[in-house]
Image (cartoon, rainbow, N blue to C red):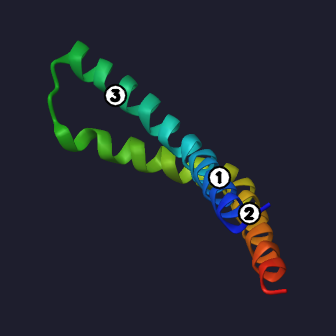
Amino acid sequence: MDDSATLMALADRMLWTAALGAVPVLLANLLVGLVVGIIQAATSVNEQTLTFVPKLAATTLVLVLLGGAMMGLASDFLKDVMAQIALAGR
């Protein structure tokens, strides 16, 4: 495989790794925002700062629960990138 194909494969894997790392936090914030929005619409409370604390709590909870797996995914990708750099240096 030539260098450009290797770089494109690494770029593709980098995008997938970033997406897989971001999805849990984004989904948690989406669901919390949707629930808070429905509650605000039902109660006619239109305070924009009301969504901040639940979203912050959801983000913290997701990072505590899944942060290790997310970091494992990123470190596996970094190991593969470093291995590819070592192979390219030969």
Image quadrant holding the N terminus, namely bottom right
Q: Which residue is mark 2?
A: 77
Number of marks present in the image shown: 3
Which mark sits nearer the N-terminus, 3 or 1?
Answer: 1
Task: Answer with left or right where residue 52 lies relative to residue 84.
Answer: left
Which mark sits nearer the N-terminus, 2 or 3?
Answer: 3
Note whether 40 is above or below 33 in the view shown. above
Q: Residues within 10 Å of mark 3 (few under 14, many from 20)?
A: some
Kind of residue indicated by mark 3 = Val
**Label disc, if present, on residue 87 of the rendered structure:** none
Whether residues under marks 2 and 3 lie with C-beta atoms below 8 angstroms apart, the answer is no
Q: Position of residue 19 (x, y in %)?
A: 57, 46
Q: Position of residue 18 (x, y in %)?
A: 58, 53
Q: Which residue is mark 3?
A: 36
For this orientation, the residue located farthest to the front is 2
Task: Answer with left or right where residue 55 lies relative to residue 69.
Answer: left
Q: Secondary structure at mark 2?
A: helix
Q: In terms of image quadrants, where is residue 41?
A: top left
Give the alpha-carbon distance from disc 2 to disc 1, as whole Å.
Answer: 7 Å
**Label disc, if present, on residue 17 of the rendered structure:** 1
